[in-house]
Image: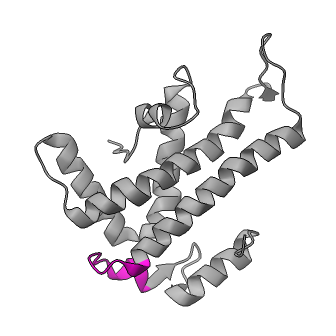
Amino acid sequence: MKLLLIDEKYIKENSAIELNASGKVLNTIIWDIQKNLLKNILGKTLYTELLKEAKMKNDDEAYIISESSSELLFDYVQPYLQASTLTEFIVLNSYKLSNKGVLKLSDNNASALSADELEYFKNFYDNKKNVAENNLKEFIKCDEDITAPDADLKKTTGIGWYLDSNNFDDFYYRNSGKNKYL
């Protein structure tokens, strides 16, 4: 079972995405971001603890999430997941992968965006995602209540290198093509 820390309803209620947007696409994006990006930011231990708390809350409405997990989840993780989902949704909602290749979606009542306009729109939300990601990383570094040693002492890169937190950010930005100082 996939446990999402936010769902399509949360995205639709808290963003500019319309209510008729595909829930399947949104939930797929959320899951992908959660397991591939968020898990790397939080570290395996903290990510697992947050999922345990969310599952207990999901199973029992009366369960009270710990104060530090609650702050992490509601003030940092959910905004990060929302902004990241919007960034991904822009592209996935404008194009469709099919057995005929990549198709650009159009509507009789709307004009299609040019590639430059679409890129501008995506960059707008990508900047929001980057701010939410930086806020999440700063919270993890500064919060003394978070007791996940792998979350703030060491990070594992995709190729098995262990880096301390000071070097990880520099390594990440050097190898991601992103500008660290935007």
Q: Residue at x 55, y 32 (%)?
A: 25
Does the stretch in magenta take in 156? Answer: no
Side (left or right) of 139 relative to 127: left
The answer to whether residue 8 of the structure is visible from this angle is yes
Q: Position of residue 128 (x, y in %)?
A: 62, 54
Q: Is residue 143 magenta?
A: yes
For image coordinates 49% across by 28% down, the residue present is: 23
Quadrant in which the N terminus appears:
top left
User: Would you say residue 164 is visible in this rendering?
Assistant: no
Q: Residue at x 56, y 45 (%)?
A: 85
Read off the magenta span.
Answer: 141-153
Camera-nearest residue between 22 and 102: 22
Residue furthest to the left in view is: 62
Is 87 situated left or right of 51 in this image?
Answer: right
- The part of the image, by quadrant, that contains residue 75 is bottom left
Q: Could you tell me residue 151's position as x and y percent?
A: 40, 77
Residue 71 vertical position relative to residue 98 in the rendered view, above or below: below
**Would you place residue 37 above or below residue 179 in this image?**
above
Residue 22 at x, y percent in the picture: 55, 25
Closer to the camera in the image, 1 or 135:
135
Q: Which image quarter holds the C terminus?
A: bottom right
